Image (spheres, rainbow, N blue to C red):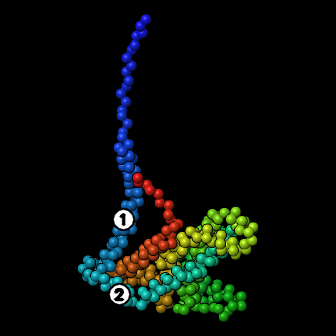
Amino acid sequence: MTTATTPVRTAARPSAPAPGRRAKRSGLGKRLELALLLGPALLVFVGFVLVPIGIAAFYSLFEWNGFGPLDDFIGLDNYADAFKGGVFQGAIVHNLIIAGLSIVVQLPLSIGLAMLLNRKLRGRAVLRALVFAPYVLSEAITAVIWVLMLQPNGFADQVLKGAGLGGLVHQWLADPGIVLYTLFAVITWKYVGFGIILLLAGLQGVPAELREAAALDGASAWQITRHVVLPLLGPTIRIWIFLSVIGSLQLFDIVWIMTTGGPANASTTMATYLVDHGFKRYEFGFGSAVAVILFVICFVFALLYQRFALRRDTQGALTRMVG
């Protein structure tokens, strides 16, 4: 007995690509994906950030009033004039004072209020909303409100007199000795709510078990705050300091509306100095030089802070996207 055997035909299958070829295609696909995702953002960044910076740096090399051709090349004289001027030096000091006061005053105030509002209190949600409300207002509205409140015999003076503190009444915005601190008080009222909300978010990441364990070990409330809460709140605090210092260096809106840098340049900041010379006095070349200086100061601070303060917080935040 014989059995008939039929030949089995096997369909030709495409051969699988080699591992190296497959990896090459995968890498190319990732690069195309990155180009599609990042391309529009890079174009916007180049067009609205790098190009204006380059144009400002170019204008800063000329003595130019904003009209007519750029034919008076003076090199770095605008930069030299800016640093020689006492008003600009004072503006830098004012920015640094605001930045220092923000860290010394606003930060402890924000931490204390955030810890208080993190507790179980009756009406806590309402208190949080009230504290955050000033941050919702625009800088222009904030400035107008406080100009009206701080005018002579205004609301602030009446409150002080009503509380028997008439001796504290001052020309809040007209006294060169206190105008900068008056502005800082307004800035604190405006932005402390943002800091509290930021720190409240950080406090949510502090495990309650750690506090309870420390309390069982006999730690006091201050020791728990000092050795448990604040170290875990460190990344949030460092981010807050970064945002606060950059905002203090770029301070403009509230100062410009409330005092225009006065009286006698006692509240001039780098940004108000820039606008005053660039747009009011039509010294566009000089104003551009001040803008470049302000940019360099902020950029250098950001790099150094990123390098020495935020480095451990951002490690691992960036993933390797291209193999």
Q: Position of residue 134 (x, y in %)?
A: 60, 73
Quadrant of the image containing the N terminus: top left
Q: Please state which of residues 254 and 149 is positioned toward the viewer in this rendering.
A: 254
Question: Quarter-wise, where is residue 12 in the image?
Answer: top left
Q: CA distance from mark 2 to mark 1?
A: 30 Å
Q: Position of residue 317 (x, y in %)?
A: 50, 61
Residue corresponding to mark 2: 81
Question: Quarter-wise, where is residue 75 in the image?
Answer: bottom left
Residue corresponding to mark 1: 47
Please report the residue visible at 56 percent of the width from the left and 68 percent of the height from the top.
235
Please report the residue visible at 43 percent of the width from the left and 83 percent of the height from the top.
273
The answer to whether residue 25 is left or right of residue 246 is: left
Please report the residue visible at 63 percent of the width from the left and 89 percent of the height from the top.
153
Q: Please state which of residues 104 and 286 is positioned toward the viewer in this rendering.
A: 104
Against 298, residue 39 (above or below) is above
Q: Is residue 186 at least partly visible in the picture?
A: no
Residue 125 numbered mark, or none: none
Hey, what amino acid is under mark 1? Gly
Residue at the left extreme of this rendering: 71
Q: Please state which of residues 274 and 317 is positioned toward the viewer in this rendering.
A: 317
Q: Position of residue 230 (x, y in %)?
A: 63, 72
Q: Please state which of residues 279 and 271 is positioned toward the viewer in this rendering.
A: 271
Which secondary structure, mark 1? helix
